[in-house]
Image (tube, grey):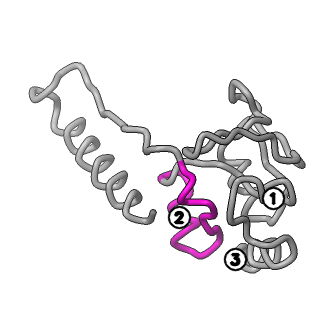
Amino acid sequence: MGGLRIAKYLAARGTPRTPADLAQHDAIAFSLSTSPDEWSFASGETLNPPTKVVVNSNDIAIAAAVAGRGVARALSYQIAPELRAGKLQIVLSEFEPPPIPISVVYAEGRRAAAKVRAFVDFAVERLRSDKALN
């Protein structure tokens, strides 16, 4: 059902091809951002797309995008399940900023308990597989 909503949204509003095209779209802003209404792109462009919804949770921003309420910004691993299910579609990928590296740090290092090492192995594998969705 979510895939139909995003498809309907993009069919009605058009798929943005450049950041400037976002002027014709509804943005889902993240209120905890330093500048929730300002979106920056790798091209150096900065703009304030019309904001329809302001949220304070990435999960809510993603749910609003799935519901067809507008376009949102999220990290690839945050939307991986929705991408796999066809509920969301990445737009403007050529204007994305460089990826943010993620480090898994824990105090015990190589002497960590087996359950800590198992979690780290799981997290690394999951993050790498979700990165492949881009």
Q: Is residue 21 magenta?
A: no
Could you tell me which residue is drawn at 62 percent across and 69 percent down?
89
Type of the residue with mark 1 = Gly
The 10 Å Cα crowd at callout 3, few under 14, some 14 to 19, many 20 or more, is: some
Q: Nearer the viewer, residue 106 or 113?
A: 106
Q: Quadrant of the C terminus?
A: bottom left
Q: CA distance from mark 3 to mark 1?
A: 13 Å
Residue 3, labelled with which disc?
3
Q: CA distance from mark 2 to mark 3?
A: 12 Å
Could you tell me which residue is drawn at 23 percent across and 39 percent down?
115
Label 2: state its secondary structure.
Answer: helix
Q: Is residue 78 magenta?
A: yes
With respect to residue 120, does 108 lie above or below? above
With respect to residue 63, does 74 lie above or below? above
With respect to residue 89, does 79 lie above or below? above
Asked if labels 1 and 2 touch by Cβ distance under 8 angstroms, the answer is no
Type of the residue with mark 2 = Pro
Q: Which residue is mark 2?
A: 81
Q: Nearer the viewer, residue 130 or 99?
A: 99
Q: Which residue is mark 1?
A: 70
Q: Which residues are magenta?
A: 77-96
Type of the residue with mark 3 = Gly
Single out the mark in the foreground, 3 or 1. Answer: 1
Please give left or right for residue 26 compared with residue 42 in the image: right
With respect to residue 123, does 81 lie above or below? below
